[in-house]
Image (spheres, rainbow, N blue to C red):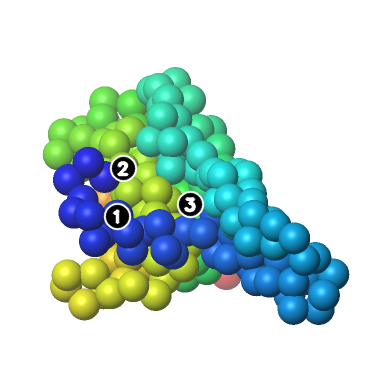
Amino acid sequence: MDSLSMPQRLQLFLYSTGNIVGCVLALGGLGLFFLGIVHAWWWVIVAGLYGAGVFGWPRSDLAKMAEQTELTNDTLAQQVRQLVDSVANGLPKDSLDRLRSIQGTLVELLPRMQELRERGIISAKDSFTVVETVRRYLPDTLGAYLRLPRFYAQMQPLSDGRTAAKTLFDQLTVLDTSLQDVAKSAFAGDAETLVTNGQFLESKFSEKLAFRA
């Protein structure tokens, strides 16, 4: 935020919920003046209503919550759920759906990380990807989006032509796809073991059934 230019800061303010609420309240004050309900000091009332909207509207702490959520090795899966629940109201539906998909993959992977590492099934690179997604990539991505006013994030094109909402969706898609690839690789060995065991059982018991016949 410190590197933003003055025009960018102005855009963020204009799209902010506080400014929008302030404008609505100020228009209400002008309405009272034109209806003849207020006369003297009408401009003070209008300015006061605008200021009440700008400074009185509660600021969202979702970005700070996303970035400052402490994630430890012992409770990663539980804290992923808490992180997702805490920011859900601030995200567009498509991004929230993608985030829920990421959550589902992490909830499957995280409780088994140590076992998968000990068995040599998951590589150090994939293990690093999973842990860093929870500790850094996901909180940083969500925090960067949630710092923006909702209207700005969904309507204002950025330098690459995408809105912040579209950028968030694309970034979450990258994380989701990466984690799903890790999960497929990690669980592929167990899946093949199940198939092999099934073939063994089928062969074993088919021989006994043939003998009895």
Name the image quarter holding the N terminus.
top left
Which mark is first along the chain, 2 or 3? 3
Q: Are marks 2 and 1 in contact (CB under 8 Å)?
A: no
- Return the residue at label 1: 9
Foreground residue among 137 and 8: 8
Percent position (x, y) of residue 12? 36, 59
User: Which quadrant of the rendered structure holds the C terminus?
Assistant: bottom right
Residue type for callout 3: Gly
Residue at 43% x, 36% y is 64
Marker disc for residue 140: 2
Q: Nearer the viewer, residue 208 or 95?
A: 95
Q: Amino acid at mark 1?
A: Arg
Q: Residues within 10 Å of mark 1 (few under 14, many from 20)?
A: few
The secondary element bearing badge 2 is classed as helix
On screen, residue 160 versus residue 23, left or right, reads left
* Kind of residue indicated by mark 2: Asp
Which one is earlier in the sequence, the residue at label 2 or at label 1? Answer: 1
Image: 60 above or below 24: above
Q: Report x, y in % for residue 206.
A: 48, 64
Query: How far, Cα to Cα, is label 3 from label 2?
Result: 19 Å
Disc nearer the start of the sequence (1/3): 1
- Per the image, the residue denoted by label 3 is 104
| Image quadrant in which you'd find residue 157 | bottom left
Which class describes the residues within 10 Å of circle 3: few (<14), some (14-19), or many (20+)? Answer: some
Is 213 situated left or right of 157 in this image?
A: right
